[in-house]
Amino acid sequence: MKESHENRSDLAPDSKAEKFGGNASFPRKSAAKGKDRNPREPKKPRRVTRDYLMNYATWYLERFAASRARLEKLMRGKIRLSVAEYGTDPQEAEEWMKSVLNTCENAGFINDTAYAKGRARSLLRKGKAMRVIAADLNARGIASHMIDDTITDLRQEADQAAYEDIRGTDPNLAAAAAYARRRRLGPFRRPDQRDEKRDKDLAALARQGFGYDTATRIIDGDLDHLNDLLSMIDGI
């Protein structure tokens, strides 16, 4: 008979230390990086002087186009922080700001008329409706009479740029066509997708501020006609 062997618990390793030779050690996980670091303190604002505001305005306008109202809003933020931190005289800072704005305007660094026209053209090329363009200019601090003049001039420019048989067409149609081209909606889709995506495409134009009549004329339109409409956009 084969001799049976009993399993003895005292012969089996009863710990990881015994299993790995009795003296194995495992490094503990280190604390998460940055856990003990102090949070970074916010940068202190600069003390406002006229020279500082002039330097800031020059720096900003070298990098970004801006209206007078936009630059004024940014400088008012600087002044508010300086008043709170250093006790800067707010009335004196206001005079500095007006002086800087006038200097920039007289030097041609700020020109709200040119800024409004340039931005309006850019938005029209992107396929923005006229009323959306007007709202955008208003939000950027352009005066209402200047917005009216800008929209009128934009309509005239678009009409002059259009093919002869397109002249007199509402530029909103051309803007909607431009947006459809950018997003590949309606006639700019593959033919087998147009019917399936029609409602979705109409909704996309509606979200951009175009009315139902304009949207249906674009989404249900002919590609050649839309390309003719785009002459109003591409030519300005």
Image (cartoon, rainbow, N blue to C red):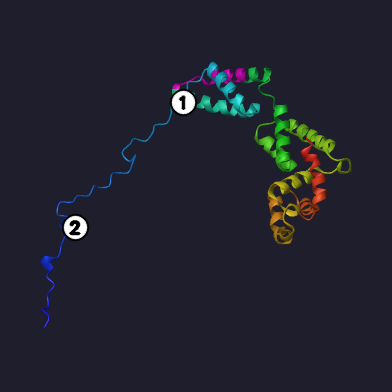
Magenta segment main secondary structure: helix
* Quadrant of the image containing the C terminus: top right
What x and y, as percent, mark residue 20?
18, 55
Q: Residues within 10 Å of mark 1 (few under 14, many from 20)?
A: some
- Which residue appears farthest toward the bottom when viewing the image? 1
- Identified by mark 1, the residue type is Pro
Q: Which residues are magenta?
A: 86-100
Q: Is residue 181 visible in this depiction of the protein?
A: yes
- Asked whether residue 97 is drawn in magenta, I would say yes
Q: Secondary structure at mark 1?
A: loop
What x and y, as percent, mark residue 183?
68, 49
Q: Which residue is mark 1?
A: 45
Judge whether 42 appears above or below 33 on screen: above
Which residue corresponds to the image point at 70% horizontal and 34% vertical from the top-left?
Answer: 119
- Which residue appears farthest toward the right when viewing the image? 165
- Asked whether residue 79 is drawn in magenta, I would say no
What x and y, as percent, mark residue 117?
73, 31
Question: Foreground residue, 195 or 69?
Answer: 195
Q: Does 104 sit left or right of 117 as displayed?
A: left
Judge whether 223 appears above or below 1 on screen: above
What x and y, as percent, mark residue 37?
33, 36
Measure the alpha-carbon separation of dots 1 and 2. 58 Å
Q: Secondary structure at mark 2?
A: helix
- Identified by mark 2, the residue type is Lys
Question: Foreground residue, 172 or 47?
Answer: 172
Q: Splitting the image into 4 quarters, where does residue 170 fall? A: top right
Which residue corresponds to the image point at 69% horizontal and 35% vertical from the top-left?
Answer: 137
Question: Foreground residue, 91 or 65?
Answer: 65
Q: Does 102 sit left or right of 83 as displayed?
A: right
| Disc number placed over residue 16 in the picture, else none | 2
Numbered disc in front, either 1 or 2: 2
Q: Residues within 10 Å of mark 2 (few under 14, many from 20)?
A: few
